[in-house]
Image (cartoon, helix red, strand yellow):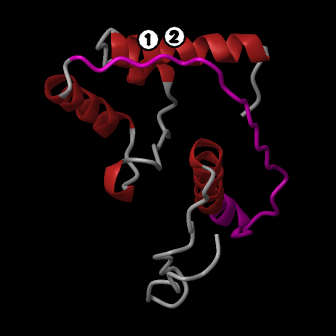
């Protein structure tokens, strides 16, 4: 989705989101800051959750970790744009499913120096988990 926001506007938005969502304990901002089709693909246990469950999770986190605070010191903006898919193509589903996994591994690499095997547990074709020893 294209935006009219500048890179600095986007960074300010992210900083304010985390200030409100985590530090100011305003879980309801998730409903205003995320699109209705938002899914967090990086939840504990590898779950993907939408806006409603993300809000519930944060309410529980406020209770369990009442002193939790975050500071966004720096960030990288990565934009992935796909378009012009042929009618009836299965590519929309493939890239929508695959990109979050690839970006999750990139995030892990940047944070820890080690990527993750994003295809472990992929049962879409065989019905069986993929080889866990496969390279990321």
Q: Is residue 32 above or below residue 60?
A: above
Taking the image as drawn, is residue 5 in sight?
Answer: no
State the extent of the magenta-drawn residues as a range.
67-95
Please provide percent x and percent y for residue 135.
64, 76
Q: Is residue 73 above or below residue 45?
A: above
Image-based side of 27 in relation to 87, left or right: left
As drawn, the residue found furthest toward the front would be: 113
Image-based side of 96 in relation to 131, left or right: right
Q: Quadrant of the C terminus?
A: bottom right
Which residue occupies the foreground of this view, 57 or 73?
73
Image-based side of 130 in relation to 94, left or right: left
Q: Is residue 45 magenta?
A: no
Which residue occupies the foreground of this view, 124 or 67?
67
Q: State how many labels appear.
A: 2
Residues marked 2 and 1 touching at CB (< 8 Å) = yes
Please provide percent x and percent y for residue 100.
59, 53
Q: Count neighbours of disc 2 (C-alpha within 10 A) and say few if under 14, some if 14 to 19, many if 20 or more.
A: some
Residue at 32% x, 57% y is 45
Q: Kindly indicate the quadrant of the structure image that contains residue 27.
A: top left
Q: Is residue 48 above or below residue 76?
A: below
Residue at 69% x, 70% y is 90
The CA span between labels 2 and 1 is: 5 Å
Residue at 56% x, 62% y is 116
For mark 2, what is the residue?
16
Image-based side of 97 in relation to 55, left or right: right
Q: Is residue 82 magenta?
A: yes
As drawn, the residue found furthest toward the left would be: 63
For mark 1, what is the residue?
19
């Amino acid at each position: 989705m294209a935006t009219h926001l500048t890179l600095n506007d986007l960074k300010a938005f992210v900083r304010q989101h985390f200030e409100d969502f985590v530090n100011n304990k305003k879980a309801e901002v998730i409903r205003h800051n995320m699109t209705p089709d938002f899914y967090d693909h990086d939840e504990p246990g590898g779950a993907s959750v939408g806006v409603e469950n993300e809000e519930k999770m944060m309410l529980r986190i406020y209770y369990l970790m009442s002193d939790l605070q975050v500071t966004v010191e720096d960030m990288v903006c990565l934009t992935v744009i796909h378009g012009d898919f042929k009618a009836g193509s299965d590519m929309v589903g493939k890239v929508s499913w695959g990109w979050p996994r690839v970006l999750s591994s990139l995030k892990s690499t940047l944070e820890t120096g080690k990527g993750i095997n994003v295809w472990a547990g992929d049962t879409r074709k065989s019905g069986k988990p993929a080889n866990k020893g496969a390279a990321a």
